[in-house]
Image: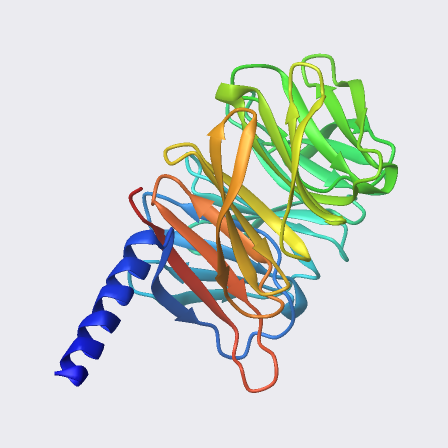
Amino acid sequence: MKHIAFLLACSLVCAWAQETSTLRLNKTIPLPGVKGRFDHFAVDVKGRRLFVAALGNNTLEILDIDGGKRLKTVTGLSKPTGVLYLAEANQIGVANGDQGTFKLFDGESYALIKTVAPLEDADNARYDRQAKVIYVGYGAGALGILDPGTARLTGSIKLPGHPESFQLEQGGSRVFVNVPDAGQISVIDRRKGTVATRWPLGEFKANFPMALDEAHSRLFIGCRQPAKLLALDTTNGKRVTDLTISGDIDDLFYDSARKQLYLSCGEGFIDVIDQKDADHYKTRERIRTAEGARTSFFSPDLNEFYLAVPGRGDRAAEIRAYRPQAQ
């Protein structure tokens, strides 16, 4: 009877843990032979492909999401960083930090189509669907504007330091840019192509990742020194709150359907933060992952959160796909 009671208690605990877990591991995609750290991701929703910049391996890894396997490894890159997918043209864009280039590849054959240069230390990339231009952070402080049709750099917006993560408003004309070397958020008016204002972050340093909740006028900033999540009011740049998080944050995403944030931290955790309302936030869960697993991507269209786990020692590199659970 004691044995049965123990098993019943264990099953209840397991059931409770599953019910309260916000992210459930859905599948693991192995990446044998891939060395070093990862950088940014992009997704082809219709084709159900994931594009992963394997920065330390100097490759772009193209994965079959449903099949849980690698489709293709694109070589000839040097410190690949930002990645984006242009669905209408079926093209993949990759920023290369060491080469100082932005390369466009055919989405079917994966052949190189065009190269935009020079873009020293090319990094994050975003596609403006309304204007049909690509923004790329690069150099000692600039946001480049690229025409994907002609593969030309058509403009550049000067910044006070190298840009890290940035977000484009969909219902407005602003671009919010993390500039950690300057300890600020630079706010760009993309109609004028100039910096409209700057929001200093004071004692909060190493502001690399960023996410935007446009519906509630909130901008989320992940800082490493100290390890904090900041919520800023986008109407005035004022800090609404700050929350202690796990160390070595590198990526940050807002799930508007569930009103929660996913933070991937190199300390070895995914932090899940609940948004009670626009001004109040609380840590819901710290999901243990692996040391150094700090790069991630959330696709609301596919309803999956992807975490890159770099190879270390006997541990091979892999991508872990998590499914957000109903609240």
- Residue that appears at 84% across and 39% down: 203
- Residue that appears at 36% across and 55% down: 21
Specify the farthest residue to the left: 1
Q: How is the image coloured?
A: rainbow
| Residue 28 on image: x %, y % | 38, 68
Specify the farthest residue to the front: 2
| Residue 80 on image: x %, y % | 65, 57
* Residue 142 left/right relative to 13: right
**Which image quarter is the C terminus in?**
top left
Q: Work out whether residue 283 can be spotted.
A: yes
Q: Is residue 163 above or below residue 267?
A: above
Q: How many marks?
A: 0
| Residue in the foreground of this view, choosing between 302 and 324 | 324
| Residue in the foreground of this view, choosing between 91 and 319 | 319
* Residue 189 left/right relative to 265: right
* Residue 122 left/right relative to 295: right
| Residue 160 on image: x %, y % | 87, 32
Q: Is residue 237 above or below residue 274?
A: above
* Residue 229 left/right relative to 188: left
| Residue 99 on image: x %, y % | 76, 56
**Which image quarter is the N terminus in?**
bottom left
The quadrant in which residue 256 appears is: top left
- Residue that appears at 56% across and 33% down: 127
Q: Work out whether residue 116 can be spotted.
A: no
| Residue in the foreground of this view, choosing between 69 and 27 | 27
